[in-house]
Amino acid sequence: MPDWLADSNTQWVLAGCVLLGISSGVLGSFALLRRRSLMGDALAHAALPGVCAAFLITGTRSLPVFLIGALIAGLLGAGCIQAITRHSRIKEDAALGLVLSVFFGFGIVLLTLIQHSDRGSQAGLDKFIFGQAASLIGTDVQVMAGCAAVVCIASAALFKEFKLLCFDAEFARGIGFSATFLDGLLMLLIVLAVVIGLQAVGVVLMAAMLITPAAAARFWTDRLDAMVWNAGLIGGLSGALGALLSTLAVRMPTGPLIVLAATVMFLISLVFAPRRGLLSKAARLLAIRSQVARENALRALYEYAEAAGAWDVKVSRDELAAVKGQNPVGLAAQIARLEREGLVVTHDGRSSLTPEGLRTAYEVVRNHRLWEMFLMYEGQLGADHVDRDADFIEHHLPRATVAELERLLRVHGLEPELPPSVHPVAA
Amino acid sequence: MIGTSGAWIILTGALVAASCGFLGCFLVLRRLSLLGDAISHAVLPGIVVAFLLTKSTTSLPMFLGAIILGLLTAFIVQSLAQGGVQGDAAIGVTFTALFSLGVVLLSRFAYGKDLDLDCVLYGEIAYTPFDTLLLGGKSLGPRAAWVNGGLLLLNVLVVGLLYKELKICAFDPEMATAVGVNVALMHYLLMGLVSVTTVGAFDSVGAILVVAMLIVPGATAYLLTDRLEHMLGIAMGVGAASSVAGYFVARSLDCSIAGAMATVCGGFFTLAFLFSPSHGVVTRNVAQRRLRRRVAQEDVLLWAGRRLEAGQTAAFDARDLSRGLEWLLPDAAAAARRLTGDGLLAARGEGFSLTERGAAQAQELIRRHRLYESYLDDLGYATDHLHAAADRVEHHVSAEMTAALDVATRFPDRDPQGKPIPRSGS
Amino acid sequence: MSVQIEPRMPPVATAEVAAPLEVHDLTVAYHRRPVLWDIDFSVPEGCLIGIVGPNGAGKSTLIKAALGLAPLASGWVKIYGKPYAEQRRLIGYVPQRESVDWDFPTDALDVVLMGRYGSLGWFKRPGRADRELALECLRKVGMADYARRQISQLSGGQQQRVFLARALAQDASLYFMDEPFAGVDAATEKAIIALLNDLKEQRKTVLVVHHDLQTVPEYFDWVIMLNMRQIAVGPTAEVFNNENLQKTYGGRLNIISDVADALAKDVPRRGR
């Protein structure tokens, strides 16, 4: 073990930051889904006057005392936000900003009062603004561990209740769960998480710990339980990374470093997460575009031949493009691609479908026309059973519907035909 | 007592607060309060970078840095929201990341130099008088005052020129687009103004408390008026007043001036929340209680009046009242007592009866009720719906409206059910 | 007009089974504005009951009042003779679809499982029996293949079916449904009605807030016509007529009267 890691102080700092990351990640997931992300910001800022008042009243510099003060102030802040939104026309965002700034301002007043008083040093209170994890000692971390345990146990025990609350509060009330009570409980847990984070990350940046890991975790999964685990993991990692960085840097408060670590993970998630990440989405989009372009080319060739009445007719690129108003350059690229696949053959700038190409084009055209029929008759056929994930229309719809569509194709004279060929067609 | 430097401090503070409060109205109305909060934090790296590049704390590069960061923030938030991050979370992620970046840059590269972390974050308005603007060797007063005065002017000017565009964007962005207003441009313009105003405010209230000056005066004004023009004016006034009062509070308690300003502003908000003539919680409660009382009393009078009309001249007691109106006995007794106190009922033996004044008022109420029924009947309401509707409305029909109803129904003698309509004053 | 009423004791339970839903002198007010006024009715068991009325008539409020979700200014609501709080297990609720965030990380089966939470109570997790039941409910609405599908990938009609499956999972005797037909296509609507008739076969009672007057006689045995006040409550054949429609929708609405007349002539009423 490297020297600096063996230092017990470093270990405490690390432990504290990891605990913070885990608990705020877990809670942040619920807060995010309940659309209360910035509530954590308001409650964190509101905690400052509580900490200062606790010091003024008890005169002791002790973490549990501070935390109780922070708890009370946080709950008071939450109550004010509720009262303002419920009894006046101030909307929730303004209420949050209001409570955030006024409580914090009051906290600064108390802080400076303490600073200017004759109690000497302000007992490290201003470390609560940005966090100074380096000052964490063993007993502090034990308190933090206790709080983190409460948060995690409560989240696990009430997992289905919180899930219900975040998904459909109306229904929750309907089956007898009090949404107000659960919301209040969630708020209490958020305040607890804030209290844990005060020393490590500080008041101003606590919001980030409640938001960023959860937002990052959302990209990796579509299941709530996985999301909560991921958020805890990402939060814990950010805490660890940030703490390590701050031991290496001098004069740097821990808070910003932890937040930056979390942000980096968020950015990684945003870009690289499978399915929901930006890269993945872009790749899917490109793939679809490519597929559509290929199929358009095949259809164009088929329909040209269909109209000409000869399956082996040859057509130049520009003529083909003119028929449907497609872009000749793009079309040319697709034709070249089809040539490579052996579906098209070109002589002297004029192309035609090979038998293999004809069969493929037939499938494409049939599929396309069935869709057209479907869209025309959607109302009567019932759009409800559409399985949007399937590619071919036969997979989307029940067999009876497909048969009906084929009948309609015949009625409209649009049924494509496949000439008898060397390769028997699988029905 | 205050001294010149004190006066300058107050002036600067008032200018900052007025500027912020003015812009803040739009933030509150467009539900962008938290975006404003975000921008005020996120401009920090822009300022630090500007400082590091130019090695000075002159205003222009810092403003430039701030505008760039402010617009960047708004842009990033929007992009994230489109990319699948929930609205609030997008704001939270962006501004905390940028702010952290700013703090890290500040601590790492600018430590101990002119740009002080504490100062940027909480402001130190007490120092502003000493940083004077020199022009041609002559001191023109604190730079901060000039800068913020200029910003206030800029804000008022821009908003004044684009008033109707900003107003319609705040109220109904879709209609604004339909009418041809470039909503996105207005949005970024507003965010740009917020950015520069924030920077200007750093000197006095610092980054964290700018938010208070942005939101609280606007929210206070929102509770005091229903017109945008008045709201803007009131917000400026509340902001300025908070800053002045905050200064004096801070002086007497020897604490942070910025914090005091924010707290005092919060105090003003609380007063408006409770006692605003139009929206205050306490005022509403009081008004409702008065209304309930009046309605109850009028119900008693109506009941007694109809009873009299039907020929029952005997006195009635609280029990009769309770049964007749379907009220709980104590409520009936209380109402009767109050009316006696007002001289509309008189105690007669074991019970009550209408006094002359009471009878007259009852007649007037009955007249209103029956006129309204006639009016509804004219409109084509079904006959058995008339009474219930009139029952609801009769307490809220004014004397003028009654006269107008009389005219509209062509001075009827009887209501649709054939009951006589008392003449006015009879 | 005062809304204080001397509290009267509800009628003593007789030997017969209590009505599924009994409402007496119900008045609901939001911010002192009455939304429902003097509602008084009781519905028979095993019926499909439609609740109709113009916008703002208090239809959703009536359901909320029955579920204890709206403050009562006066009156009471009894479910099978007892207040809602004691009869939660007997009630199924399908709220309006807009109230939900469809981008939530969960799948269709999970949503249906939420219907079991009421009977599980606090802290307990759903077990295998609950999962089986949930799957069965999905099967009944024809969504068994979509059990593991993300709900954001479902169409409007499919989402509505999942909601219905959730209500079925509550295994209730009395169902309240708030606009279940809103924004669904014809095929889904038919499927929903088939499901409701299934419930009726099992002697369950279903109250449905409905907006399409044309289909009322076809779908519902009983109808509750509301416009803040109770205009009419009773069997559709008796009560759903031109006169009551005009009272409910106010004034002279010629379109409504034409519809009502046409209905009276052409569509065979459901005998009840």
Image (spheres, coloured by chain):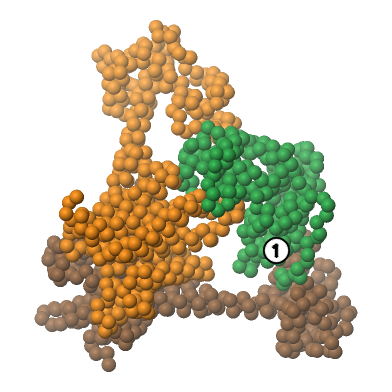
Chain colours: A orange, B brown, C green
Tell me if residue C206 comes above or below residue A10 in the rendering: above
x then y, percent, for residue B214: 35, 70
x then y, percent, for residue A248: 17, 57
Q: Give the chain of mark 1.
A: C
Q: Nearer the viewer, residue C269 or A55?
A: A55
Report the label total.
1
Tell me if residue A167 comes above or below residue A351 in the rendering: below
Residue at x 15% of width, y 82% of height: B139
x then y, percent, for residue B91: 35, 57
Residue at x 67% of width, y 74% of height: B396
Crowdedness near tag 1: few (<14), some (14–19) or many (≥20) residues, C-alpha within 10 Å: many
x then y, percent, for residue C55: 63, 55
* Residue A363 placement, left or right of A133: right
Query: Residue extending furthest left?
Result: B137
* Residue B286 placement, left or right of B404: left
Tell me if residue C265 comes above or below residue B196 in the rendering: above
Q: Which element is circle 1 on?
A: strand
Is residue C130 visible in the rendered image? The answer is: yes
Is residue C244 visible in the rendered image? The answer is: no
* Residue A227 placement, left or right of C64: left
Residue at x 75% of width, y 87% of height: B340
Residue A143 occupies quadrant: bottom left
Q: Nearer the viewer, residue A236 or A142?
A: A142
* Residue C15 placement, left or right of C125: right
Residue at x 39% of width, y 42% of height: A221
Q: Amino acid at mark 1?
A: Thr
Tell me if residue C98 comes above or below residue A45 in the rendering: above
- Report which residue position mark 1 lands on: C27
